[in-house]
Image (cartoon, rainbow, N blue to C red):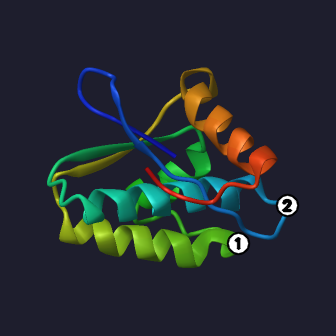
Amino acid sequence: MVSRDNNGEILAARAGTRVGTSPLKGEALALRLGVLLAEDHCWETAIFQSDAQVLIDQLSHSEVLPDWIIEEDVLYLKSRWQEHPNWQFCWIPSEANGLAHEVAHWCRRMDVVSDE
């Protein structure tokens, strides 16, 4: 997960690990890490971007039931979103999400799980 300011400058990055093989679960973890970072820094306004359309749909549309593998994450993220109405969750194409993926891959290769 990479955090940038409105000029595109990197503010922080976080990475985490989970045992499993689901890319969707990994995307949900990245959003959770982003939410935790925003709360740690008391950011009142934040835009969380993900290239996981399924995840963003489950967050944005109440009529879409959460996929069982990320249900806990979706419910958590929705609860945080209710507490922070100026936050946004939006989908971006995977081509625009390269830096976050590179950070995650680097952390996995280097066995790094940390923040900032």
- Badge 2 element: loop
- How packed mark 1 is, by other alpha carbons closer than 10 Å (few <14, some 14-19, many 20 or more), is few
Q: Nearer the viewer, residue 63 or 9?
A: 9
Amino acid under label 2? Thr
CB atoms of marks 2 and 1 within 8 Å: no
Closer to the chain start, of discs 2 and 1, is 2
Q: Nearer the viewer, residue 27 or 42?
A: 42
Q: Which residue is found at the position 27% from the left and 32% from the top?
A: 5
In the image: residue 7, left or right of residue 94: left
Up/down of 90 relative to 63, above or below: above
Which circle marks residue 113 in the picture?
none
Q: Position of residue 60 (x, y in %)?
A: 39, 54
The number of callouts visible is 2
Name the residue that disc number 1 marks: 69
Q: Which residue is found at the position 17% from the left and 59% from the top?
A: 85
Which circle marks residue 21 in the picture?
2
Q: Nearer the viewer, residue 107 or 43?
A: 107
Image quarter of residue 22: bottom right
Q: Position of residue 38 (x, y in %)?
A: 29, 57
Q: Disc 2 or disc 1, which is closer to the eye?
A: 2
Q: Which residue is found at the position 67% from the left and 57% from the top?
A: 26
Q: Position of residue 99 (x, y in %)?
A: 57, 29
Q: Which residue is found at the position 80% from the left and 70% from the top?
A: 19
Q: Residue furthest right?
A: 21
- Badge 1 element: helix
Up/down of 114 relative to 68, above or below: above
Amino acid under label 1? Ile
- How packed mark 2 is, by other alpha carbons closer than 10 Å (few <14, some 14-19, many 20 or more), is few
| Measured Cα–Cα span from mark 2 to mark 1 | 11 Å
